[in-house]
Every structure is written in structure tokens, then in C-alpha cells.
Amino acid sequence: MTDLLNIRKLSVSFKMEYETTDAVRNVSITLRPGEVLGIVGESGAGKSTIGNAIVNLLEPPGEITRGEVLFKGQDLRNLDDKQMRDVRGKKIGMIFQDPQTSLNPLMTIGGQLIETINKTINLYGSEATNKVIELLESVGIDEPEARLNLYPHQFSGGMRQRVVIALALAGDPDLIIADEPTTALDVSIQAQILDLIKKLCQERQVGVIIITHDIGVIANISDRVTVMFNGQAVESGEVKQILTNPKHEYTKSLIAAVPRGDRKVERFKSIDYIEGGAQTQRRIDLDQHWLGKKFTQHYSDTAISINDLNKKYSLKKAFLKRNRSYVHAVKDVSLSIKTGESFGLVGESGSGKSTIAKLVAGLVSTDKGSIKLFDQEVTNKSKGKDVIAARRNLQMIFQDPYSSLNARMRVQDIVSEPISYYKTASTNMEMRQIVRDLLDHVGLGSNAMLKYPHEFSGGQRQRISIARALASRPKILICDEPTSALDVSVQAHILNLLKDLQDDLGLTILFISHDLPVIRQMCDRVAVMRHGSICEIATTDSLFEKPQHEYSKHLLELMPKTDFI
Amino acid sequence: MSLVVFTMINIVGDPVDMLVNPESLPDEIERVRSDFGLDQPAHIQYIKFLQGALSGDLGNSFIFGRPALALIAERFPATLELATCALIIAIVFGLPLGIYAGLNPKSFGTRIIMGGSVLGISIPTFWLGLMMIIIFSVVLGWLPVSGRGDIGSFLGLESSAFTLDGLSHLIMPATNLALFKIAMVIRLARAGTVEVMSLDFIKFARARGLPPERLVRFHLLPNILIPIITVLAIEFGTLIAFATVTETIFAWPGLGKLVIDAIVNLDRPIVVAYLMFVVTLFLLLNLIVDIIYAALDPRVRLNGDQ
């Protein structure tokens, strides 16, 4: 069969004023009709740049410096703007990562589909409308006629991504480039969308390029895979062969860093290839150090105990009670977490897991129920010294490392703030020394002290967050999706760090994630949440081996299969 | 608001001193004072004012002896006409120039536009107005120096914009008033364009092969209009309320001139009535903005059929 797409020795560079960055170097790719090719790599590997380069949508100053992009034998680089527009949409469709932002919020979805159909296949009026309805049906949207006049915000994330796929298919393209099509979606929706793409690919014999950082997605959907690292394709081949028997060092370490859902490993394997050489870490001797200072007070065996917790958020405010509407974010939740345990909360978005974290941390007030930290009631009705003391034992690490650090404070000030607030250091000199030690301990090095957060990568920022959390010498850490914004290798580093800290300091961890394999690696016990209530609480092993609740079984089934690695 | 205005205006000066001949006898001054009700304590005056205001009577002008509201209503059309004209000029020139600048950030034209907008914001209105009079009226003799000109009527609306003579009188003050707003619209439109063009849905629209004209008209324009309309509606209020400087320079018989005279003569009812009027105007404009918002942005509409 002839190749649908043939990229030969493609190089893309971004010329800046003082330096030129080579985002893609000498990459060659071939794709046949009806085939799914995965391009996998971490952020900055140049995988999205390839997708954009194919349809010439590179953001300036990016440009193709060398190589050929042969689409059905024709070099797309030779086309002018107008010819290129005829290729886009009509021959090559694209799907972007975030369905929240890839649709025009001020235009009905019908309007957006119709304008695309007008342009690509020259159908107008009722013919175009019929085609739109047919498209929406084929991507699995019910009652398409009624939904034509709805605006994007009236759809859920998964439905919006279906609309985006319908838009990509509107011109009957021969090739679809999907750039992280499911990254912003929940697992169950991810599975549906991937199935849909696979099905459309087989039915219509289109070629699909899936660009993703998620090995699980690649394993589920693609036929062949190209692994990108630092702008170069380090390895390509059949999925099975690459995943089971990787040749290149980078591929090996990448696969080793993927959390496994099938069994628990002690630590993630060394992935130093990715971060460029082993880090020289100076760790502190905890027996002697401030951080490891034992508290004289006795702590009970139950770190967190939650009883009949309820929280409603109001959706619509109204004077009359009957006109108000609420979403019941947390419904009659009771659980207790033992001291030193790491407890997982798992569920899809909107299941109320983050709300529980905020309630426990006191960031939002409770409606009903009680929360006790080491037998001290900390709900909003109780105030006083004891509550402040109890709260000090608890620190939080947030999901987004970019917005959870004050951009105008130096790292040293960020980390020292809790120390000076709780007055746990006697002199400024001592405080500075503690900050230095903390930064060393989380693997950042003390020369980070005088820098500002924007000078760090996502993973490094998350280390700063961890150092800040440790600075108040907590007994409990709440980690709310601490690694979901990070690359898999960085995730492995951060998870290793959290595990070490837990072992060294005897921390109790409440770990919140939607990612089952991560939960499996991190937690002793797990609670599965859905619609604000807990479906099942079990030890991690028994949940993964013998789930009791229907919903737990369902979630586990949807977990990307990595067992053949 | 009425309380604030009333208190403030009672603090500054005694209007009777301005109204009466300084050589008048003391009992004559007292007579004038009691005629206007100014001999009573301030809070009684205020209560009387409120009673009048509730029935639509904001008092009579001390100087003209006519209802203050009627005087304002008389002058208002001229100002409204000037402000509307200025607003239209601002949108017609500002929006395309701003979008052009946003789409071609590095071109030579953009530099000229942005440079011009800096000048537009920083040059004082009165100086520019004087310069315009010197160039277009005195040196070139193209346009009349001042006044409002003939008034025509079209579809029941009376405006000087409907006669050639009126238009020639209108164009210079309106442009003068608009220059600052053009500069502002350019900056808003450019900032909006730069921001929206970098969003995913524009990229996605390009990836579907849509031509640039369509991209700008249907995807870019509605999205940048929302913030621009918000600002412009408020600015329209300031155009009406504070066109004083331009009106003074071009001797435009609008509200500005009335108010300046009233302030100088301490004609309290007119000042109070004018300020009440401006407050109402801003409230109305805010309401209109909210309505336009809902029309433009489906996300703002309440009770959306989700």
C-alpha cells in the first residue's frame, strides 16, 4: 500500500533574537491509510511541533528548515497559503488537547460545523445541515438536531471533544492529527474517545497520528509508535515491540517511569537519563535536624477522622429557598486515616475528592459533620489555640505548580513563611539554614533560595511546594493531584521523593488522584468516590485484585492496560 | 448621591452674593434669600428638594428662573449628537486599525498606528481643538469656527448631522472629542486581537481551513467586542457628561457650557440637577451594557437551557 504521509528528515527551528532552538531534528515518519501512529514523548520533545509543521500551523518564529512533508506524494511545503487552506480541514483534520478552548465560545456548534462544511466540501443550506446531523451522530452525540443551536459551554468536556472530532471529520479528511486528544478528560471519557477515534479510523480508512505523553494511550490505540526525545525520534516501530522490548535507553527509562497498575513496586526505577545525570543530593540527618525534631506531645493513632461530612455548593442563589439549587459535593462521608498511613482518594472529576481535601485543610467551611485531626475537632464551629495548633500539623500540596507559588516572592521567602509565622526558629540565621536544608532535602539545592518561581520547571516547582509544606513540620500531608500536571519521568521523581519523606518522617499522607496506577504505587488504603459519596474503602491490593463495588470494577476496567510491559 | 451633592454645594459660597447687586440694601438681600428658600437650615432645604425631586421637579434656576430640568433637556440633544458622532468616529476608525495592529504586530503600519495612539492619548484635547480651528478654519478656511449650524430632521430625529451646514459644524468638534477615544479603541482592539488570536479555537479554525476573512469576522470580532463595548459604554457616559472642554472651545451649545456657567454663578439647582442627570445616565448605560452583554455572550445569559 502506498504511504499516506511520508515525512523525511524534517527539521524545525525557532529563531529567536539571540539563539535558535531546534525543536525538531531530522525526524522521519511514515503513515499508511487506516493506521494509527503514536508519537510519544515528554514536554519539550517536539512532538506537537511535528503535528503543526505538517499543516504549516507553526507559531512564528517557528519554521521548517529542512526536510519534506509528502502527503499522498505531494510536498506540502511547496503549497502557498491558499492551497494550504484547501488541504487543512479537507485532507488533514486536527484535534486539539483542550475541548474547553478549541471551540469558539460565542458561536453555536451547528454554526461552527456548517461554516467548516461550507468551506471544505461546498455543501450549503439544508444539505449542510443534514451532513452536520450525520456527523454528530457518527461521533455519538444523541439528538443532534436539538443540539445544533447550543453553545459550547452547554456541553460537558467529553461531549465537546466529540464536537471537536466531528469538526475534524467535517471535510472527510484522509489524515487526522490528534494532539493530546484525551489529556484533559476523565478516564471513562478517555476510553470512549479513544474507541471512537479507533472506530472512525477503521471505518473511514483514515490515517491517524496521535500525539501524547501517555504511554497508556499509545498502548491502547496505536499500531506503531515513534518515541521523541529532545527533538529527535529516538526509536520507532510496532507498539508491542517498542513497549516490551525497548532498545533505546530513553525509551527504557520512560517506560520504567510509568506507574504500573498491576502490581506495586518499591520505588520507581532510576530515570536519570531524562533529567541528565544523577543529581547530587545532600540529604540532612533527620535525627539531629530541626525537621526531624520529635514532638514531646503524644499523638493518637488516628490522624484524620471524618464523620458524616457534608458540603453543598450553591448553583443558583435565590431569596426563596425553593428556588435555590445546590450541588451536593460531599455527601455523608466518613473515613478515618491512621497515623503514618498513606490513604488514597480516587474518583473522576466532580466526584468531590478535592472538596474533601479542602474541607480537611479548612479552606472551605463544612456544612455538616465533623473533622478531627489527632482527636482535635477542626470544623468551622470550633476555633481557638488548639485548632490552630492542630492545623499546623497539616499541610497541602496543590495540583498546579504554576499557580500555587506566589510569583513575586523569592523561593527562600516562600519556604520560610511558615517558619516565621509559627515562630519555630529562634533566629533569622537558623531560619535561613533550615530553608537551605529543606531545599537540599527535596533535591533542589540551596542556590535555589534567591530565585523566583518562574525560573523553575514544573517538577522543580512542585519540589518547592513540598519544601514549603515541610517547613511547618507537618504530621499530615494532603497531596491533591500533585503530579497530574507533570511529565511521567518528573512524576516518578516527585513520587519517589514523597515516599522517602513519608518513610523518614513518618508522615500521614492523604493522596488524591484520578490516576489509578499512581494510587496503586503510593497508597496503603484507598477510598473510591463517586458523586460526592464513597463507594468503597479497601486496602490498595484488595481493591486492585478484588474490587467489590460495581463502580470500582468499572474504573479498573478503564485503566489503560500496561500489563504487557 | 443627592445628599452628597447637596451637602457639597451648600458648603461652597453663597449664591445670593452672586445674584444681588452688591449695593443692595440688607433687607432686600434677605428678601431674595427667603424667595429662594435659602434662609432655611440646610436639612430643611434638602427635604424640600427631595419632595420636589420625587415629583420630577429639581428646582428652578436662580438665574434663568426656569426649571433646571427643562434647561438640561433643552441643551441635551446638542451634546448627545456630539457624543454619538464622536463615538461612531472612534469605532469606525479605532476598531479596524486596532485589529490590523493586532494581526500584524511587526509591520511598519502597526508602528505608525501605535505611535499615533500614544499621541492621541497624551495630547491635551483643548490644545488639539485650538490647533484644528487654526488649521481647518483660519488657515484653510474649510470648516466653520464654531456654533452648531442648521438642524435637519430625518425620521423624526432632529440633528445637525442631517444638513450639510450642520455636518460641517459638527465634524470638527466631534473629531476633536473622538481622538482620545480612537486611541483607546485601538489599544483595546489590539490587545484583544493579540490575546484572542493566540487562543486554541482560532488555531483550530485555521486547522479547518477557514479563510482569514471569516476568521476575523466571525471568530475574532465577536470575542474582542465584549470588553470593548463595556469600556465604550462607560466612555460614552463620560463623553456626554464631560465634553465640557470641547464644547467650550467650539462654542457648542451643549450641556457643558450650561454647567460651567452654572458653577461660576453658583446656580445651585442647575448643578444639582445636572449631577443627578449624569448619575442616572451612568446607571442607564450600565444597564444597557449588561443587556448587550447577554445578547453577545451566550455564557452570560441567565436560565440558559442547559
Image (cartoon, coloured by chain):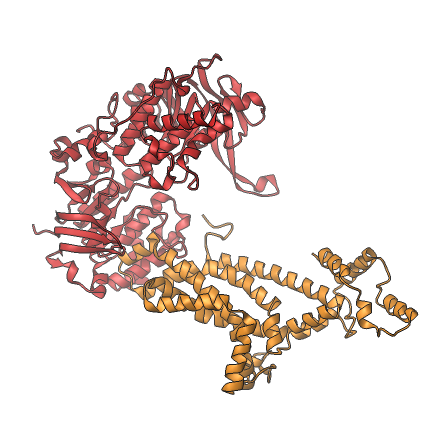
Chain colours: A red, B orange
| Residue A84 in the figure: left or right of residue B267 | left
Measured as percent of width and height from the top left, residue B92 is found at 45, 71
Q: In this image, A169 relative to A449: left or right?
A: left
Q: Quadrant of residue B51?
A: bottom right
Judge whether A27 appears above or below A80 on screen: above
Residue A89: x and y, percent? 24, 57
At x 29% / y 61%, what residue is drawn?
A: B210
Q: Which residue is pictured at 89% across the width and 67% down the height? A: B30
User: What residue is at 57 percent from the left and 74 percent from the top?
Assistant: B82
Do we see residue B176 in this rendering? yes
* Residue B46 location (% of width, % of height): 79, 58
Q: Is residue A471 above or below residue A3?
A: above
Residue A548 shows in the view? no
Q: Quadrant of the N terminus of chain B?
A: bottom right
Find the residue positioned furthest to the right.
B27
Q: Nearer the viewer, residue A448 or B12?
A: A448
Outermost residue toward the bottom in this view = B141
Please state which of residues B52 and B40 is positioned toward the viewer in this rendering: B40
